[in-house]
Amino acid sequence: MRRAPLEYITGIANLSRRAGHRTAVLQHYHDRLKRDLGARYRLNPSLPDEEFINQLASYQPNLDTDALRQTLRQLSQTNVSENEMVQIVREATLFGGR
């Protein structure tokens, strides 16, 4: 009997959870947020956060730089609980949709 795709996804998620890959997940969202926000202006997402924020703000004067700075700082944390990780990613996802 073949497994449903959802079973594979659930299995990988559970393995990742047990392995404690929270820092890697946060780093992924950190990088993705910078890529998504900077794509329109062809900003280099590998710039240091502060430089990236300054360059992005020069194109978007109404950018809430403090909120972006805090979001990127939260995404750069290590040693967070699973609940904290979920909350941080939720906030980052909302920020990217602003």
Image (tube, rainbow, N blue to C red):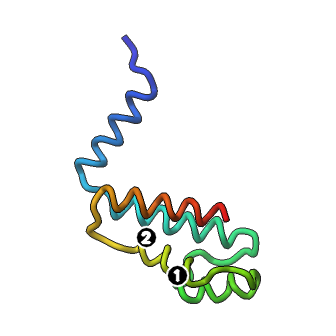
Please indicate whether residue 41 sits to the left or right of residue 52 in the image.
right
Residue assigned mark 1: 69
Secondary element at image label 2: helix
Q: Is residue 31 left or right of residue 27?
A: right
Q: Is residue 4 above or below residue 61?
A: above
User: In the rendered view, does 18 fall on the left or right side of 6?
Assistant: left
Q: How many labels does the image show?
A: 2
How far is the residue under mark 1 from the one under mark 2? 10 Å
Q: Nearer the viewer, residue 65 or 39?
A: 65
Query: Tag 2: residue type?
Result: Leu
Q: In which quarter of the image is the N terminus?
A: top left
Q: Residue at x 49, y 58 (%)?
A: 90
Q: Which numbered dot is residue 75?
A: 2
Residue 63 on image: x %, y %? 68, 80
Q: Can you tell which quarter of the image residue 11 is in?
A: top left
Tag 1: amino acid: Arg
Q: Which residue is drawn at 40% across and 15% down?
A: 2
